Amino acid sequence: MKKFEGMTDEELALLYVKGNNRAFDELLSRTQTKLFTYIMFVVRDHDLADDIFQETFVKVITKLQQGQYADTGKFQFWLTRIAHNVIMDWYRQQQARHLVEPNAENDLQNLRGASVMDTYRESEIVNEQVLIDVKRMMNALPAPQREVVYMRYYQQLSFKEIAEATGVCINTALGRMRYALLNMRRMAKEHNIELALEA
């Protein structure tokens, strides 16, 4: 909608609060893919992700209509926080929050982003396999750990932002990341997976 092209998400949200339903349609169009990807990554079930996505937007509409949104310049962050709360409510209902205890000898010093990939095909193949293995291990993590890894490495949020989005203190967010990395190192060791990317 050309009418809304230059507007921020925050401006669209406030326009919706004033009664402009087309502003909300534009807002939904802009944010739905990113939000659904986040939810799907955490819950790993398409039908459940659909349900959580819909419930999240019901809560968003309710909160907007009740005036519970203030323009802070972080609409996407606010949206992610609501989705996180819906996901955590679902997990509490299912009583499925089981944390894996880390092994003291685990250390994940070799896991780094694919910052420099060599142009040689052999290195590319090795690096692709490492990233596939890392993603598989991430999917095996408990939801709170997987969520922190996703927010940190895929959304590039700071630990302060992660703590705010997930409603925990920064030390808890850091602890979840630490346990996630320890768990991934343990999985790599158990399955003889090499995590180092080739230069």
Image: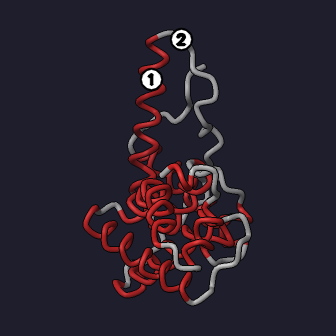
Residue at left offset 42%, top offset 49%: 137
197 lies above or below 37? above
Residue farthest left in this picture: 47
Residue type for callout 1: Val
Using residue 190 as the reference point, say whether residue 158 is left or right of it: right
Instruction: Using the image, tell me which numbered label, if any, was put on residue 29.
Output: none
Residue type for callout 2: Thr
Using residue 10 as the reference point, say whether residue 37 is left or right of it: left
The residue lying toward the viewer, choosing from 63 and 178, is 63
Do we see residue 39 in this rendering?
Answer: yes
Question: Looking at the rendering, which quadrant does residue 141 occupy?
Answer: bottom left
Residue farthest front in this picture: 3
Q: Residues within 10 Å of mark 2 (few under 14, many from 20)?
A: few
Residue tagged by mark 1? Answer: 126
111 lies above or below 142? above
- Residue 103 point in image, percent of width and height: 55, 60
* Lower position in the chain sequence, tag 2 or tag 1: 2
Using residue 183 as the reference point, say whether residue 163 is left or right of it: right
Q: CA distance from mark 2 to mark 1?
A: 12 Å
- Residue 2 point in image, percent of width and height: 52, 49
51 lies above or below 133? below
Residue at left offset 49%, top offset 58%: 31
The residue lying toward the viewer, choosing from 172 and 54, is 54
Indicate the secondary structure of the residue bearing disc 2. loop
The residue lying toward the viewer, choosing from 64 and 197, is 64
Residue tagged by mark 2? Answer: 119
